[in-house]
Amino acid sequence: MALIPATILTGFLGSGKTTLLKRVLTEAHGQKIAVIENEFGEENIDNDILVSDTHEQVIQMSNGCVCCTIREDLRATLADLAARKRRGELDFERVVIETTGLADPGPVAQTFFMDDEVAEAYLLDSILTLVDAKHAQEQLDNRVEAQRQVGFADQIFISKSDLVEAPALAALQHRLKHMNPRAPQRTVHFGEVAIAEVFDLKGFNLNAKLDIDPDFLTEDGHAHHGHDHDHDCGHDHAPGEACHHGHAHHHHHDDDVKSFVFRADKPLSPAKLEDFLGAIVQVYGPKMLRYKGVLHLKGTERKVIFQGVHQLMGSDLGPKWAPGEPRVSKMVFIGIDLPRDILIKGLEGCLA
Ligand SMILES: Nc1nc2c(ncn2[C@@H]2O[C@H](COP(=O)(O)OP(=O)(O)OP(=O)(O)O)[C@@H](O)[C@H]2O)c(=O)[nH]1
């Protein structure tokens, strides 16, 4: 049986998850979608909103948060849905999990890898994160959950851009890009987004490529993040405008979630790499939110697609390197206070 694609919809409280989901379900004529709703309270308001307008299967998981207390419920719900589909009792083509605004997407994503029954039935398509343009700066300053939701995203949707001025939006986009350079960003007005931009993104499975703006990489390659001039630098200038005072800038936000990229022109040794990454995830796994890469490994003519969440990692053989295509390994790491230099040095030590 074909794997059932699953989408995790996350975003801080009030960021517009339900609004977006409702739009998508309304638009998704002909597609049968099972929705797993997770809310804290007993009253599931979102559920009513969704059910009144659509004919989807909505499974409600209340009284806890899907990422912690009721994670076993999530596993059981997913397994049960798949079993009922197999038996012909339920008919659906994909699953959407809407998490609570305070959920950490990590454990939710891990459910798709850790449990055999779930892993055999589902394919995690992508993690979509809603970011509230009006409130995100403050949420990101104060709430680690909000940061992690951005760090995990395969696609970022920015809601409520109608409520902010263009420079504030640009500053937010800049900040998000530095936290997660891998996730494309797109503004959405009251959830208005084409279904093709929501489903089958294959973001998590990374079948295709790492979409990282090359200029961004050069900028980010420096140890000093001299680019966040637009916040808290103590000088009066418009957001987005560079600060012209001559002192050295630090990363003023001190966002816990940061990212960096490793690149190598020479092939990597599979054995060395496995040893090194295996050791690294033992130590830093809890801080490693997402890491992904396209690798050139010695001994294979095919690209190796590598990805992980916390301690769990996996790799797949991708397509062959095209004739004349530069065989460059690229890996992006997104995490909390990751020791960039240790990781980069270690990876350089893995060259064949
Ligand atoms: N101005 C504006 N408001 C929006 C936009 N998108 C959503 N909203 C409003 O924001 C509020 C919260 O939206 P929801 O979709 O309920 O947010 P949520 O993320 O599901 O909220 P929780 O489930 O409580 O975490 C609602 O009043 C929406 O109408 C937008 O693009 N612009």
Image (cartoon, helix red, strand yellow):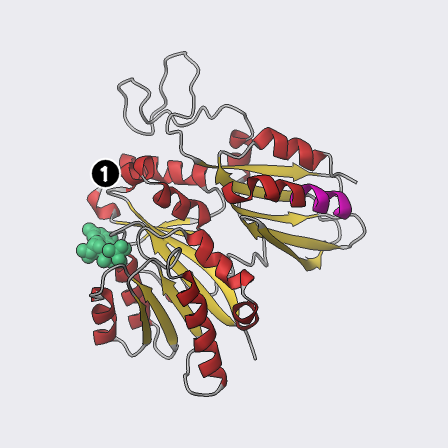
Circle 1 packing at 10 Å, graded few (<14), some (14-19), many (20+), is few
Residue placed most toward the observer, 168 or 270 = 270
> Which secondary structure type mostly characterizes the magenta part of the structure?
helix
Q: Is residue 11 visible?
A: yes
Would you name the residue on which mark 1 appears?
165
> In which quarter of the view is residue 340 placed?
top right
Q: Amino acid at mark 1?
A: Glu
Seen as rendered, the residue at the extreme top is: 246
Point out the image quarter for the C terminus: top right
Q: Residue at x 39, y 40 (%)?
A: 176
Residue 242: say if magenta.
Answer: no
Q: Which residues are magenta?
A: 268-277
Residue placed most toward the observer, 73 or 28 = 73
Q: Is residue 206 left or right of residue 324?
A: left
Q: Residue at x 33, y 60 (%)?
A: 193
Number of residue marks? 1
Q: Position of residue 235 (x, y in %)?
A: 29, 17
Q: Is residue 329 visible?
A: no
Q: Is residue 5 left or right of residue 165?
A: right
Q: Residue at x 66, y 42 (%)?
A: 279
Q: Is residue 326 above or below residue 243?
A: below
Q: Is residue 192 left or right of residue 282?
A: left
